């Protein structure tokens, strides 16, 4: 289980001290949405390079607080990257079409949105969304870890279990020297 407060503090620590404290203060008063807005604004303002694993973790935090993919996904993609090796890679392209969930054996009312991949083994963490007549639902119904090639579901997680799904992806084949706390 991921300690979200620890992740929040680690992400805030990427920033200069004044911004770090402001992001932590948002967490302390229960204003996570404002803290995420500030985190991404400060990362961009200070041009802080972030690795792909950090980018993926920010995406999971944003989704946990209802801010993924809108309004924050475009801002994450604007953050400069670092040259640090990463086990995870944020792969979602909000302009691409989702995949039919039937390709992975799920119901035809769902679509798969590939989200985060493991650079070591090629497995993918995807979100499933209900396909409504007016478009995709905003909240994922499930998280799934797909085998390489996005064909077979290795793990299925229920709504709200994004951190558990990310942890399972990370632990499924991760090399110890690349592990993150």
Image (cartoon, rainbow, N blue to C red):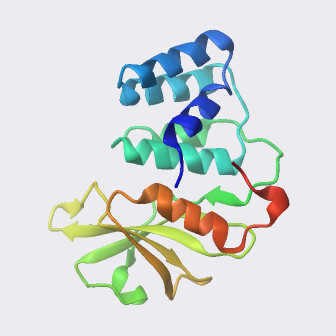
Q: How many marks?
A: 0
Q: Residue furthest left?
A: 133
Residue 168 position, x and y percent, is 57, 68
Q: Residue at x 58, y 51 (%)?
A: 56
Q: Residue at x 70, y 39 (%)?
A: 50
| Front residue of this view, candidates 11 and 29 | 29
Residue nearest the viewer, comparing 77 with 22: 22
Residue 106 seen in render: yes
Q: Residue furthest top?
A: 18
Which percent across, then down, holds residue 3? 53, 44
| 44 versus 112 height, above or below | above
- Residue 68 at least partly seen: no
Viewed as shown, does residue 69 lie left or right of 2? Answer: left
Relative depth, front residue between 5 and 63? 5
Identity of the residue drawn at 52% across and 14% down: 22
Q: Judge whether 140 appears above or below 22 on screen.
A: below
Q: Position of residue 154 (x, y in %)?
A: 52, 83
Percent across and percent down for residue 63 are 40, 48
Q: Is residue 134 left or right of residue 178?
A: left
Q: Residue at x 73, y 34 (%)?
A: 49
Q: Can you tell which quarter of the image residue 97 is in?
A: bottom left
Compared across the picture, whether 145 is left or right of 14 comes to: left
């Amino acid at each position: 289980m991921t300690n979200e407060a620890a992740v929040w503090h680690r992400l805030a620590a990427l920033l200069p001290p004044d911004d770090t404290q402001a992001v932590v203060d948002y967490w302390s008063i229960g204003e996570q949405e404002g803290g995420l807005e500030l985190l991404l604004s400060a990362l961009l303002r200070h041009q802080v390079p972030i690795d792909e694993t950090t980018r993926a973790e920010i995406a999971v935090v944003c989704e946990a607080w209802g801010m993924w993919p809108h309004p924050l996904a475009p801002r994450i993609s604007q953050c400069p990257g670092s040259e640090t090796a990463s086990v995870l890679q944020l792969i979602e392209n909000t302009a691409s079409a989702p995949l039919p969930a039937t390709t992975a054996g799920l119901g035809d009312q769902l679509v798969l949105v590939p989200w985060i991949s493991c650079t070591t083994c090629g497995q993918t963490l995807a979100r499933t969304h209900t396909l409504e007549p007016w478009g995709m639902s905003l909240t994922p119904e499930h998280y799934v870890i797909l085998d390489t090639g996005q064909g077979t579901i290795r793990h299925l997680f229920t709504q709200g279990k994004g951190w558990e799904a990310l942890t399972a992806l990370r632990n499924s084949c991760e090399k110890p020297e690349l592990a993150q706390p």
